[in-house]
Amino acid sequence: MKYRAYFKLKLTLASPLSIGSSNSENTDRDVVLDSRGKPVIPATATAGVFRERANKDTVKYFGEIDKFKYDEKAKKTVKIADFQKTDLFFYDAQFLAEKAVSVRDSVALNEYKSAKSGAKFDFEIVETGAVFIGYVEAVTEAAADAFENLLTNVLHLGAKNTRGYGSVSVEYQKKDFNSEKTDEWLSFDMFLDSSWENENWKTPDKSEALTTIKLSLKQNGGLSIRQYSTNPGKADSVPLALRDETPVIPGTSWAGMFRSHITKLLDCGKNGLDDIFGFVDEGSKQSAKSKIRFSESQITNALQKQLTRNAIDRFTNGTKDGALFTEVTVYNGTTELQIDLRGKIPGEVQSALAAAILDLHNGYAAVGGLTSIGRGMFKIEKINTAKVSDKNFKDYWNEKDSKWELKNLKEDIFGGE
């Protein structure tokens, strides 16, 4: 034994995790479970995320298989990469507690906010706050150093990780051995807590280059992001919420609202923002990852109200048979939205995003359903960016000229680019 390094990773979910298996026993997409029936983060998921972060000098530590391609000029198949054994070994991350799985409803909407036919599905998620413990083994010092440099205190795992899912904060412990510590290495068991009791937990620094916007929001009316209930004696629908009944606005809802509104502002059509918001074309099998990541927003200090409504026939103005509907909605809550942008964002999209933020504050852009009757509206109380800290949003209002300073807002977000 020349060298070995071991990392113990504590992965804490900062947002729900959607990491599906091939099973669909409980929902359309169930989470991955281990032999104990508990959620697990497969080693392939964490290895893939770290490999994606690696550059051309460090990706070699993750191993490589022989790769070939057909050379049109030479009219033969040629090798473009040689097999290389990995220097980093990843292990599944195990869940520590007993319960943390819940179900999310989802439906695709058209431009009129009506459900698309056949686009309703539900899926399991692991709740925010769940903690997993995983391990990584490095067999060379160079690989250990490279992996430690790839660590940041936020990972994004699983599906929909640009839409508020899969944000994971990281802490780690490290223990290494060389040829002079062979006896210690032989008695070391990385799966035993006692083997790590003398090692301090470390928090990595953030390293991803992002433009980050944090908005502090106050509800200006009700909110209609629902999950349906079949329990007798309860409302037909209740707010989408965590297991502890904290209402949430998923990142998918925020992304849909901003994409729709920016598309209208730029008059660019439904595919005009594919390079920014991402896309998947099943026909051509082409795709692009979103350059914009929206957080999930938890609503606090809200008032819940149960409403019972009838559907009205527009021809007779009478109630429709069987159309009595009871829902619980929330009012007057506060929440936060974080928008992360990576890479180069075109100037016209920068302007449109800043304008969409203004429109959200003024009630011209709303999130969720029933927006035509006043649901989903918010006031922005404060904004945080790289240039401003806890700036009151009303400071962008120019009282003298009675207009909003869109240019100043854009500069505070993007630095005047």
Image (cartoon, helix red, strand yellow):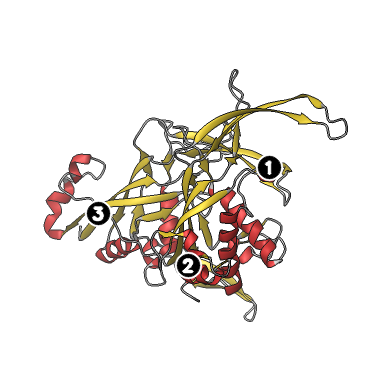
Q: Position of residue 356 (x, y in %)?
A: 59, 60
Q: CA distance from mark 2 to mark 1?
A: 31 Å
Neighbourhood count class around disc 1 (C-alpha, 10 Å): few under 14, some 14–19, many 20 upward: few
- Percent x, y for residue 16? 47, 43
Residue at image location 73% in from the left, 44% down from the top: 114
**Callout 2 touching callout 3 (CB < 8 Å):** no
Q: Secondary structure at mark 1?
A: helix
Residue 44 seen by the camera: no
Q: How far apart, in angstroms, are the residues tagged by discs 1 and 3?
A: 49 Å
**Residue position marked by numbered label 3 in the rendering:** 202
Mark positioned earlier in the residue sequence (1 or 3): 3
Mark 2 lies on residue: 413
Residue at 72%, 52% in the rendered image: 111
Horizontally, residue 8 falls left or right of residue 306, namely left
Q: Relative to the observer, which residue lies in front, 122 or 265?
A: 265
Q: Nearer the viewer, residue 140 or 290?
A: 290
- Which residue is outermost to the top? 233
Q: First in sequence: mark 2 or mark 1?
A: 1
Where is residue 333 drawn, in percent x and y? 49, 41
Relative depth, front residue between 289 and 268: 268
- Where residue 213 appears, as percent x and y from the top left, is 46, 60
Using the image, tell me which numbered label, if any, was put on residue 94: none
Distance between mark 2 and mark 3 Cα atoms? 31 Å
Q: Which mark is residue 373?
A: 1
Please name the amino acid that badge 2 sits on.
Ile
SS state under label 2: helix
